[in-house]
């Protein structure tokens, strides 16, 4: 009888311990769930705050309207004509904006997108009779400079990279490696020069020559004409000017590619203004979290095919 009583006591004690462990387990599980939910809520809030349009001044005071041109210029990205031109128009329409400033930091990109943005700046300047300036941060090269020459003035830092007035198309060939590995190219095409940039076939000299003369050289000349139209007699042309070379900001002042060394703060002070209003494209929460992976992949592919250098 005593043994049975001891057994029951041990069983009761074990049950009590089990119940306590279950309670603690449920509490820790619930606490963990709440922590995870709170973490993602804070993360999404921070991402949304970081990428939402930045407005430093919404008062009725006169201010600079700043439009950010940050990143490669390509269709389907935030720096395409489709996405960037509406921001420009919104900035020009801002009645309290004394001037429009394009804050540029770009290595360039599509010549077509660059030309479309250049044309839009020219159109809006005439329509609103409002000055527009470009202020360069780290770089304004190639297609970015194509856009910048539409401005009334271009400013940069002494260490900014300016220029790269040229055109390029990247390609490569694998035929030698394929021969060594015993790989045969069996692709088919109609049209003698349809595969003139095929990296897996023999070099098509006639097709390459046609593309060089009719596409690259003509695009280069359009770029040069746009620079001359925008900069006028301010640019001091030399045999190196249109070769695709770049210059630092201090030397770019000397050769007339830009008008001076300044940042947005200096432009604001020179105009007697205290406030700026920044116009920048919005991103969805998913784009913020995923980092625009699709756009970056598309951008890399398009830059491989053809881009201003």
Image: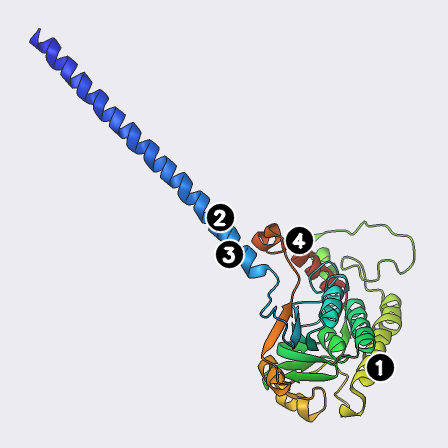
Labels 4 and 3: the sequence-earlier one: 3
Structural distance between the alpha carbons of marks 3 and 1:
45 Å
Q: Residues within 10 Å of mark 4 (few under 14, many from 20)?
A: few
- Between disc 4 and disc 3, the foreground one is 3
- Between disc 1 and disc 2, the foreground one is 2
Q: Which residue is mark 1?
A: 225
User: Where residue 225 sits: x, y (%)?
Assistant: 84, 81
Q: For numbered disc 2, what is the local secondary structure?
A: helix
Q: Residues within 10 Å of mark 2 (few under 14, many from 20)?
A: few
> Residue sitting at 58 percent across and 55 percent down?
288
Labels 4 and 1: the sequence-earlier one: 1
Q: Which residue is mark 4?
A: 294
Labels 1 and 2: the sequence-earlier one: 2
The quadrant the N terminus occupies is top left
Q: For numbered disc 4, what is the local secondary structure?
A: helix
Image-based side of 207 in relation to 106, left or right: right
Residue 300 is marked as none
Residue 41 is marked as 2
The one of 178 and 75 positioned closer to us in this rendering: 75
User: Where residue 157 sits: x, y (%)?
Assistant: 60, 84
- Between disc 3 and disc 1, the foreground one is 3
Q: Residues within 10 Å of mark 1 (few under 14, many from 20)?
A: few
Please report contact status of discs 1 and 2: CB closer than 8 Å, yes or no.
no
Q: Which residue is mark 3?
A: 46
Please report contact status of discs 4 and 1: CB closer than 8 Å, yes or no.
no
């Amino acid at each position: 009888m005593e043994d049975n009583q001891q057994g029951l006591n041990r069983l009761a004690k074990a049950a009590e311990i089990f119940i306590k462990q279950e309670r603690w387990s449920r509490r820790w599980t619930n606490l963990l769930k709440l922590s995870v939910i709170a973490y993602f809520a804070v993360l999404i809030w921070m991402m949304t705050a970081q990428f939402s349009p930045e407005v430093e001044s919404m008062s009725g005071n006169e201010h600079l309207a700043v439009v950010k041109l940050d990143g490669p210029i390509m269709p389907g990205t935030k720096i395409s004509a489709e996405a960037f031109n509406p921001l420009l128009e919104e900035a020009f329409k801002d009645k309290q904006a004394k001037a429009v400033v394009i804050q540029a930091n770009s290595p360039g990109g599509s010549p077509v997108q660059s030309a479309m943005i250049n044309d839009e700046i020219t159109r809006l300047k005439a329509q609103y009779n409002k000055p527009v300036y470009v202020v360069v941060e780290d770089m304004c090269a190639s297609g970015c400079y194509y856009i910048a020459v539409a401005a009334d003035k271009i400013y940069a830092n002494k260490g900014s990279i300016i220029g790269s007035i040229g055109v390029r198309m990247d390609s490569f060939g694998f035929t030698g490696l394929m021969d060594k590995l015993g790989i045969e190219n069996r692709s088919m095409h109609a049209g003698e020069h349809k595969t003139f940039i095929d990296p897996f076939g023999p070099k098509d000299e006639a097709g390459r020559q046609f593309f060089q003369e009719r596409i690259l050289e003509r695009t280069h000349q359009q770029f040069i004409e746009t620079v001359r139209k925008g900069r006028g007699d301010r640019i001091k042309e030399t045999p190196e000017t249109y070769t695709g070379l770049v210059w630092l900001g201090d030397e770019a002042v000397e050769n007339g590619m830009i008008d001076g060394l300044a940042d947005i703060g200096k432009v604001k002070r020179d105009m007697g203004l205290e406030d700026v209003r920044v116009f920048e494209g919005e991103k969805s929460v998913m784009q913020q979290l995923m980092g625009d992976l699709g756009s970056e992949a598309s951008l890399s592919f398009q830059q491989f095919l053809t881009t201003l250098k």
